[in-house]
Image: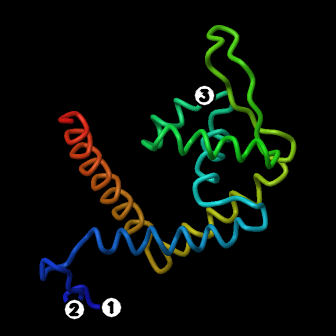
Amino acid sequence: MNLKDEVFITETVSFGKFVDRIYRNNNYYVGKHLEKYNLNKSEYKYLIQIYLNEGICQDDIVNTLKVDKYDVAKGIKSLIEKGYTYKEKDNLDKRKHRLYITEKGNSIKDGFIEILRESSEILTKGFTEEEKDAALGFLIRMAQNVCEETMKLKNNR
């Protein structure tokens, strides 16, 4: 595909168009492979956060992923119902609940991580290590740029 041939409303190449295409197709790929664990595309992101930070609270997931509180609450409830996680009241702040991985959640961890690893390999197929590093650096900067602008909009409400 020649980028010069990709036209968007602005009649120039749109980075957002490709980011969206990558996002949608990668979500589909990961989602299809996670079906065997009865996980959807949002639940797996919450599960990753709990794997990385066992004992995390829902508010920390909201802040880390920059997502809606309601969506996280719904996703965590589903993960609990599916037997992958459980909640315990925080010892210091009784209003907070800490999230932990169950035995069932730990039993899928390796397969789950393998799906995400394969997804990353597909995204960077044919890239040299230098190209992977550069692409990651560019994506991080793009994410930071859009997050900064989004925060400005949110703060101007």
Query: In this rendering, is residue 43 above or below 121?
Result: above
Residue 33 in percent (x, y) is at 69, 70
Q: Regarding mark 2 in the picture, which secondary structure is present there? A: helix
Residue 76 in percent (x, y) is at 66, 41
Q: Is residue 105 left or right of residue 138?
A: right
Which color scheme did the rendering employ for the protein? rainbow
Q: Amino acid at mark 3?
A: Cys
Of the pair 79 and 3, the residue shown nearer to us: 79
Sequence-wise first label, 3 or 1: 1
Residue 157 in percent (x, y) is at 21, 36
Q: Look at the image and tell me in which quarter the N terminus lies.
A: bottom left
Asked whether the beta carbons under mark 3 and mark 1 sit within 8 Å of each other, the answer is no
Q: How far apart are the alpha carbons under marks 3 and 2? A: 46 Å
The image quarter containing residue 50 is: top right
Q: How far apart are the alpha carbons under marks 1 and 2? A: 8 Å
Dot 2, how many residues are within 10 Å of its Cα: few (below 14), some (14-19), or many (20+)?
A: few
The image quarter containing residue 23 is: bottom left
Of the pair 3 and 90, the residue shown nearer to us: 90
Label ID, residue 1: 1
Label ID, residue 5: 2
Q: Amino acid at mark 1?
A: Met
Task: Provide the residue designation for mark 3.
Answer: 57
Between disc 3 and disc 1, the foreground one is 3
Between disc 3 and disc 2, the foreground one is 3
Of the pair 148 and 138, the residue shown nearer to us: 148
